Image (tube, helix red, strand yellow):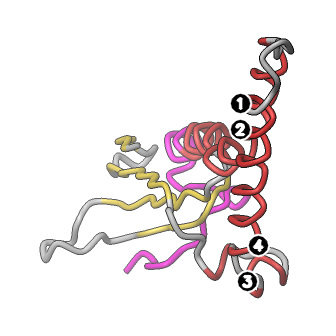
Amino acid sequence: MLRVVRGADDRVWTLQADMEWRTPSTAAQFEHDISSSRSSAVVLAALVVILAVTLVFWTPKDVRVPLWLVLMIVLLIMFFPLRWMLRRPWSVTAATGDDGEGNPTEEWTGAVRGVFNVRTQVNRIARNIADESSPGVDSPLRQVRPVP
């Protein structure tokens, strides 16, 4: 997601939000986010899929599996991957124009979790830049490169 905003002081800011496919170590909020591996989750997910396939395909011929049960199993299996996809962290960067050497003169960066939350935060940051010429102190962004 890329957005260009003109500040109140006529500086042009570029807002950029990119989905992080790996959780950055600074975004970990709990100790289990860092210390545990994903192997147990993969094993449990494989076990649920195997049991669901067994339930549906190994039933006797005279027993009819209702369609709603099959849909419930599919929804149950898809819940955690969808939750994982919708709750990925996004890195958000707000930078002003370059200083002649290709470097931004002012840069703010931060992390936002969630697809819907990142859109709200980018809109709020854009509004703050348009009104105050700064991403704002209440935004998730922190200043990386100060004004020279």
Magenta stretch: give its range: 126-148
Query: Magenta segment: does it hold 36?
Result: no
Quadrant containing the C terminus in the rendered view = bottom left
Residue mark closest to the camera, 4 vs 3:
4
Label pair 2/1, CB-CB below 8 angstroms = yes
Residue mark closest to the camera, 1 vs 3:
1
Q: Residues within 10 Å of mark 1 (few under 14, many from 20)?
A: few
- The residue carrying mark 3 is 34
Label 2: state its secondary structure.
helix
Q: Is residue 130 above or below residue 105?
A: above
Label 1: state its secondary structure.
helix
Q: Nearer the viewer, residue 134 or 76?
A: 76
Q: x%, y% of residue 34?
A: 73, 83
- The residue carrying mark 2 is 53
Label 3: state its secondary structure.
helix
- The residue carrying mark 1 is 57
Residue displayed at 62% across by 41% down: 124
Give how far apart the Cα atoms at labels 1 and 3 are: 39 Å
Outermost residue to the left: 100
Instruction: From the viewer's perspective, tell me whether residue 118 is left or right of residue 70.
Output: left
